[in-house]
Image (cartoon, grey):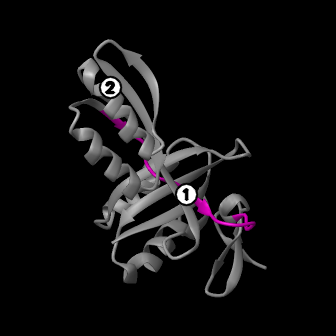
């Protein structure tokens, strides 16, 4: 089952490879992985969708927490969270079908980002189910190209989630220090 993990890491070379290595070494498939700098350029936020049995999620989190450059991990799978993807689709179609395509794209709030004779490039944003539905509809028009981002996610509401370097493990709040060891607060 796909689980969404938000991982706050130091923005250093090799961190992505180490996180992916921990997951692949244990036989877990990464369905989606996105990484970008956070508000503090010294840190990045990874959103990882990993195919893992729900009973093993805590084991995965503990293994990833052992990595020195990992600051916090938040399991967003069972939390109220916002998850979004983006897709760009280049569609080749005759001129007489363009109006119909635009009407169907509007249903998904997709927008045209490029137009040329014989093709449109559309952009759609939403959760994975919405993107999949959009792609099924657009497929009838003859896709030329597709580029899809991974999922980005964060907790809903006023909580800051992983934007602060602290997490809760076993009922205790922990904060990792540069040496990688936890300080119990």
Q: In this picture, is 78 found above or below 10?
A: below
Q: Nearer the viewer, residue 20 or 37?
A: 37
Q: In this picture, is 22 found above or below 17?
A: below
61 to the left or right of 52: right
Which residue is denoted by mark 1 in the rendering?
153
| Residue shown at the point (34%, 46%) measured from the top left | 134
Q: Nearer the viewer, residue 98 or 14?
A: 98
Which residue is denoted by mark 2 in the rendering?
98
Report the magenta residues as a range.
146-160
| Residue shown at the point (28%, 16%) measured from the top left | 118
Instruction: Name the secondary structure under disc 2.
Output: helix
| Residue shown at the point (42%, 46%) measured from the top left | 107
Measured as percent of width and height from the top left, residue 60 is found at 43, 72
Of all residues, the one furthest to the right in this rendering is 185
Q: Are marks 2 and 1 in contact (CB under 8 Å)?
A: no
Q: Nearer the viewer, residue 158 or 105?
A: 105
| 105 in the magenta segment | no
């Amino acid at each position: 089952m796909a689980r969404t993990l938000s991982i706050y890491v130091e923005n250093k070379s090799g961190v992505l490879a180490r996180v992916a290595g921990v997951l692949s070494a244990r036989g877990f498939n990464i369905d989606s992985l996105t990484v970008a700098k956070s508000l503090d350029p010294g840190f990045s936020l990874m959103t990882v969708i990993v195919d893992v049995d729900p009973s093993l999620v805590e084991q995965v989190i503990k293994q990833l927490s052992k990595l020195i450059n990992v600051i916090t991990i938040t399991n967003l799978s069972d939390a109220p969270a916002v998850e979004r993807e983006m897709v760009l689709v280049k569609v080749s179609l005759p001129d007489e079908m363009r109006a119909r395509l635009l009407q169907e794209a509007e249903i998904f709030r997709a927008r045209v980002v490029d137009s040329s004779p014989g093709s449109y490039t559309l952009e759609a944003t939403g959760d994975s189910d919405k993107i999949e539905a959009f792609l099924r509809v657009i497929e009838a028009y003859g896709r030329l190209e597709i580029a899809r981002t991974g999922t980005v996610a964060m907790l809903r509401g006023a909580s800051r989630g992983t934007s602060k370097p602290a997490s809760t493990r076993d009922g205790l709040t922990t904060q990792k220090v540069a040496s990688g060891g936890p300080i119990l607060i």
